[in-house]
Amino acid sequence: ISDLSYLKMLYYGFDGNTYVGEMIVNQKIESDVLSIFKTLYENQYPIEKMTLIDAYDANDELSMEDNNTSAFNYRTIAGSSKLSNHSYGMAIDLNPRYNPYVKTSSDGSVLCQPENGRPYADRSREFTYKIDENDLAYRLFTEAGFTWGGSWNSVKDYQHFEKQD
């Protein structure tokens, strides 16, 4: 807990209005996160919500379904017993409904989280709020040394940006 920082940041909602969001991140990425979200705000980059995971009783699925942008959440990686980088405040999920976690099984079935993000799992489609290599958030996070879950091989986590220690 002593490694974490509480941030309040301005962001543009999907409705074009300005809001104050809350996020908890690791102190190691605090200045990067503040700089990235400042630039996103200056460019009127739309974020639907930015609320602490506590508002969802730390339930990641509920937070994602509500399209909540968040960082710290003490939890394991889906389907494993290993702690997620969110547990250390080293990962951020941005507009998760429109940028879901997608895993295709060997039988061809597709797991999509959040489930209401399934219409956005097909990244060949064009749609609003899509994070890809041309997106401002992608450029800002990767320029700051974050990796993007959308470039992973075994799964695709289009909402996810993380930084290693």
Image: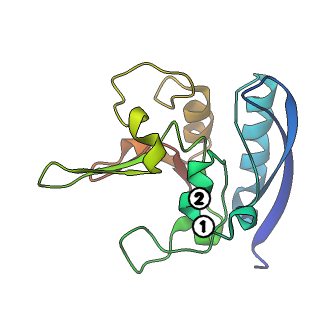
Q: Which mark is residue 59?
A: 1
- To which quarter of the image does residue 71 belong? bottom right
Amino acid at pointer 1: Asn
Position of 112 with respect to 117 (left or right) is: left
Q: Are marks 1 and 2 in contact (CB under 8 Å)?
A: yes
User: Residue 101: where, in percent of width, then height?
Assistant: 42, 49
Position of 60 with respect to 151 (left or right) is: right
Residue nearest the observer in this picture, 39 or 114: 114
User: Residue 119: where, in percent of width, then height?
Assistant: 40, 34
Q: Secondary structure at mark 2?
A: helix
Residue nearest the observer in this picture, 131 or 26: 131
Residue displayed at 70% across by 37% down: 48
- To which quarter of the image does residue 7 belong? bottom right
The residues bearing labels 1 and 2 have C-alpha atoms spaced at a distance of: 5 Å
- To which quarter of the image does residue 150 belong? top left
Amino acid at pointer 2: Leu
Kindly give the residue lying farthest to the left in the view shown: 107
How was the colour assigned to the protein in this rendering? rainbow
Residue nearest the observer in this picture, 46 or 84: 46
Residue displayed at 19% across by 55% down: 105
Q: Which mark is residue 62?
A: 2
Q: Eyeballing the image, is 43 above or below 18? A: above
> Looking at the rendering, in which quadrant would you find the C terminus?
bottom right
Residue displayed at 62% across by 56% down: 63
User: Residue 54: where, in percent of width, then height?
Assistant: 74, 67
> Looking at the rendering, in which quadrant would you find the N terminus?
bottom right
